Image (spheres, rainbow, N blue to C red):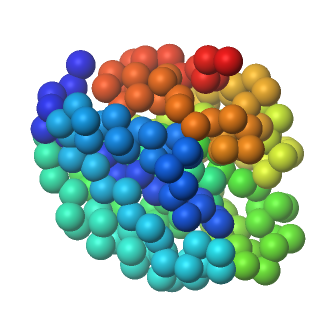
Amino acid sequence: MISMASHFLILHGWQNHRPPAHWQHWLADRLDGLGHRVTYPQLPEPDDPSLEVWLSELGRCLEGMDGEERVVLAHSASAVLWLHAVARGIVTDGAVDRVLLVAPPSASVLARYPEVAEFTPPALDFALPTPTRLVAGDDDPYCPEGARELYGDPLGIPTDLLPGAAHLDLDAGYGSWPAVLDWCLDPTAKITVRPV
């Protein structure tokens, strides 16, 4: 178990206005209730985001992280944002202690939407500076090619594919998600689908 001096940064995706029913909001509330420090920013212009603006906001958030353990959880477009930040050297060794990338969309999907086309992932020819885990639905419509094939294998990171979990969002029923809270508290915890 980790100490109570942890700081969690939770990053949402495209068109996410941090609805209270979303698992990220649920998670932020639970972690805060357990005495952890939580940063869960509303990223600027979530319906028509700017990669440069979001990178700047991410850099600002990282500068403010402290605590015995610093943990980032990034969903959807923010998972790809994280990869851009690493590729550009915004995230360096020691910036955080561990990362969970949740349901990153594929380049083919991002390219279809002008609002997020600039988020198309960079070439994955770099090493991640922080222990990172990937979790995605095995039927994610935003990553039809498969998250393990597109991200997990090229980056050499452990990948959990959850059956029938789609994009791990509200449309897929992900309001509460106890397994992700378990992972926050214990990095060896298995990430599973939410209870029905």
Can residue 3 be spotted in the picture?
Answer: yes
Q: Which residue is drawn at 20% across and 64% down?
A: 64
- Quarter where residue 58 is shown: bottom left
Q: Which quadrant of the figure contains the C terminus?
A: top right
From the viewer's perspective, is residue 29 above or below residue 61?
above
Q: Residue at x 15, y 28 (%)?
A: 3
Give left or right: position of 149 versus 183. right
From the viewer's perspective, is residue 101 above or below residue 4?
below
Q: Where is residue 146 in the image (x, y as percent from the top left)?
A: 79, 40
- Quarter where residue 131 is shown: top left
Q: Position of residue 69 (x, y in %)?
A: 21, 40
Give left or right: position of 4 versus 31. left
Q: Position of residue 41 (x, y in %)?
A: 39, 64
Q: Which residue is drawn at 44% across and 67% down?
A: 42
- Who is closer to the viewer here, 34 or 146? 34
Give left or right: position of 152 versus 66. right
Which residue lies most toward the front here? 20
From the viewer's perspective, is residue 122 above or below residue 7?
below
Q: Position of residue 162 (x, y in %)?
A: 69, 25
Q: Residue at x 79, y 27 (%)?
A: 164
Q: Which quadrant of the figure contains the N terminus?
A: top left
- Who is closer to the viewer here, 92 or 126? 92
Give left or right: position of 30 versus 1. right
Can residue 99 be spotted in the picture?
Answer: no
